[in-house]
């Protein structure tokens, strides 16, 4: 007949098993987190141990009681190695789990399972198993043999090492993981105390294994750590991987985010940039500190800190993974681009002002030059006025090209299917009308050739190629030949070949384009070729320069939608 104490021991043991099963169910939803899978193994062993021992206290059949005892013994041997694996993985040392050394660790519990199952044949784990009831419970007495003693001590030792890893995380990373890690460390005390008391046969009832009821405290502490504080949402592996990237050695502000996109660490430069409670309240939502979410940052690529005299930062995003490849968070590096953005704004304003004034003033100059040319009786002075008017027209054309150039740099591509013959015909008609003395010939092979590209960029590209060929020619050599063909051997790329009979384009002009810069010794005669070059770049194409009794500009454009 069970007494109150016996009933309490059974209920506590089975309650611990039930609590462990609940925690196991909760951890299943966190199984992708660093260390979660190994801790599930530890909790599963706890559930099996408590159920086997608590249930065994109600079974007086010697055979069944011995089988349940063997299961409980094996479960104890599994708890320590699985807790050690959890500690390694959780603190960012998961690579050690795949080493031969840890392979030896796993051999001990596996061998214990085999020896416990075959113990009646060799008795290497225990001997003299017999039921010795107390408090109405089917408690048992037996002598633990060397392997059994080694297996239990090995389990306690590996659990202690796992606890030391968590203590190291507390010391290394401050208060961020303190509550959770302390709770898990304390949870190892009840089973270690229970096993030690039982092995040393302390107390008046040495055959009673108090480890199972003590597991109720163990499971409660684990439940607090994992359910109450969401331990797996932030773990030391994030910071450990951040340290491997040289966090503190970077001269730019760096923020470390966990898998929940909360800031868990920042270097000194970031702390100076966001003074106050940045790390005192970690983990803290990124929106709270930066004012924007991670998706917005990744989309814009920039962050504005401050208002009137604030700074602008380019944002670099890098994922962090532990040695096993599991994502443990991310790292944001902020690069100060304030001066670059200010310079771009200043240049943009200067460009607009100069272009506006240049257009207005050259219009005035051209108007008066035309008036003088038509009213002056002296032919020489009238010719001089005509030259002034021509120079004014050229300046006005440069202003318009500068506007086109600026629009191209800010334009996003808008691919669409278009008929190449139609595009070439439109360009030909325009320049044939504007330059009556020019001859423009063109062919498209095949005539029905279609190209998927940005029609505006293509039109600007062809306009400038044809215009450059005409205005740099001397009559009667104003001839432009356009040949367009597809290239099946290069995924359907379309090749535009523009030929003229002009003098060779100076190599300096071509080198200037290739260098992508204007230098004091290398400067273009105009921006027409620059516009062509940028159009080709925007269209992901290529331009080549050749000479064959005239310039041959070959533009190759991809016929796809990337």
Image (cartoon, helix red, strand yellow):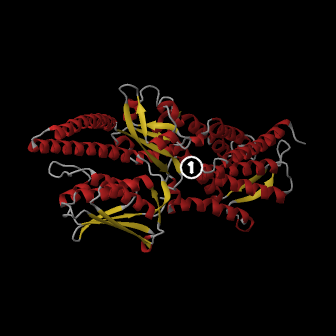
Quarter occupied by residue 407: top left
- 382 or 151, which lies in front? 382
Q: Is mark 1 on a helix, strand or loop?
A: loop
Taking depth in this image into account, of 333 and 182 the one nearest to the observer is 333
Q: Position of residue 222 (x, y in %)?
A: 65, 40
Quarter of the figure that contains the N terminus: top right
Residue 363's place in the image compared with 455, above or below, is: above
Q: In this view, does 150 lie above or below 136?
A: below
Residue highlighted by disc 1: 34
Q: Position of residue 225 (x, y in %)?
A: 62, 38
Image x and y of residue 404, in percent: 34, 46
Q: Can the viewer see residue 340 in this picture?
A: yes
Point out the residue furthest to the right here: 1
Residue drawn 63% across and 47% down? 30
Check the image and name the residue furthest to the front: 377
- Please tell me which residue is depicted at 78% across the width and 44% down the height of the picture: 14
Height in image: 349 above or below 415?
above
Q: Is residue 538 visible?
A: no
Q: Residue 148 falls in which quadrant of the image?
A: bottom right
Q: Determine whether, in the image, residue 414 is placed left or right of residue 529.
A: right
Total residue callouts: 1
Residue 287 appears left or right of 246? right
Question: Front-most of 228 and 397?
Answer: 397
Question: Residue 410: x percent and y percent?
Answer: 39, 44
């Amino acid at each position: 007949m069970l007494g109150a104490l016996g009933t309490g021991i059974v209920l506590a043991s089975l309650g611990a098993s039930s609590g462990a099963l609940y925690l196991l169910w909760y951890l299943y939803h966190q199984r992708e987190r660093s260390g979660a899978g190994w801790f599930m193994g530890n909790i599963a062993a706890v559930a099996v141990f408590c159920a086997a021992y608590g249930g065994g206290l109600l079974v007086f059949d010697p055979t069944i009681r011995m089988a349940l005892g063997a299961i409980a013994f094996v479960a104890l041997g599994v708890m320590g190695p699985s807790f050690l694996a959890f500690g390694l993985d959780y603190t960012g040392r998961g690579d050690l789990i795949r080493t031969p050394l840890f392979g030896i660790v796993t051999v001990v519990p596996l061998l214990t399972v085999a020896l416990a199952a075959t113990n009646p044949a060799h008795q290497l784990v225990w001997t003299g198993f017999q039921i010795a009831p107390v408090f109405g419970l089917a408690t048992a007495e037996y002598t633990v043999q060397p392997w059994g003693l080694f297996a239990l001590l090995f389990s306690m030792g590996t659990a202690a090492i796992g606890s030391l890893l968590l203590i190291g995380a507390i010391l290394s990373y401050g208060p961020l993981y303190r509550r959770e890690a302390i709770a898990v460390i304390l949870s190892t005390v009840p089973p270690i105390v229970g096993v030690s008391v039982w092995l040393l046969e302390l107390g008046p009832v040495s055959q009673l294994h108090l480890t199972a009821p003590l597991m109720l405290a163990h499971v409660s502490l684990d439940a607090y750590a994992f359910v109450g504080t969401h331990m797996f949402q932030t773990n030391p592996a994030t910071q450990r991987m951040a340290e491997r990237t040289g966090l503190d050695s970077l001269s730019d502000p760096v923020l470390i985010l966990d898998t929940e996109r909360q800031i868990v660490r920042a270097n000194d430069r970031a702390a100076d940039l966001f003074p106050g409670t940045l790390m005192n309240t970690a983990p803290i939502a990124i929106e709270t500190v930066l004012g924007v979410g991670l998706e917005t940052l990744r989309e814009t690529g920039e962050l504005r800190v401050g208002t009137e005299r604030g700074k602008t930062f380019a944002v670099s995003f890098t994922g962090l993974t532990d040695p096993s490849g599991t994502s443990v968070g991310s790292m944001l590096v902020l690069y100060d681009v304030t001066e670059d953005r200010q310079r771009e704004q200043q240049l943009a304003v200067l460009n607009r002002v100069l272009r506006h004034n240049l257009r207005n003033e050259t219009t005035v100059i051209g108007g008066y030059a035309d008036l003088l040319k038509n009213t002056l009786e002296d032919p020489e002075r009238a010719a001089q006025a005509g030259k002034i008017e021509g120079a004014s027209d050229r300046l006005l054309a440069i202003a318009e090209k500068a506007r086109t150039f600026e629009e191209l740099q800010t334009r996003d591509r808008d691919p669409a299917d278009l008929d190449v013959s139609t595009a070439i015909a439109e360009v030909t008609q325009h320049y044939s009308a504007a330059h009556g003395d020019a001859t423009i010939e063109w062919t498209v092979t095949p005539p029905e050739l279609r190209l998927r590209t940005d029609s505006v960029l293509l039109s600007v590209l062809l306009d400038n190629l044809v215009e450059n060929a005409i205005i740099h020619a001397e009559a009667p050599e104003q001839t432009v030949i356009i040949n367009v063909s597809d290239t099946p051997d290069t995924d359907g790329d379309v090749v535009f070949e523009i030929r003229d009979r002009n003098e060779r384009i100076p190599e300096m002009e071509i080198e200037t384009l290739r260098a992508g810069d204007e230098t004091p010794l290398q400067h273009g005669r105009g921006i027409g070729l620059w516009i062509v070059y940028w159009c080709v770049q925007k269209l992901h194409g290529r331009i080549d320069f050749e000479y064959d009794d005239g310039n041959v500009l070959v533009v190759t454009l991809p016929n796809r939608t990337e």
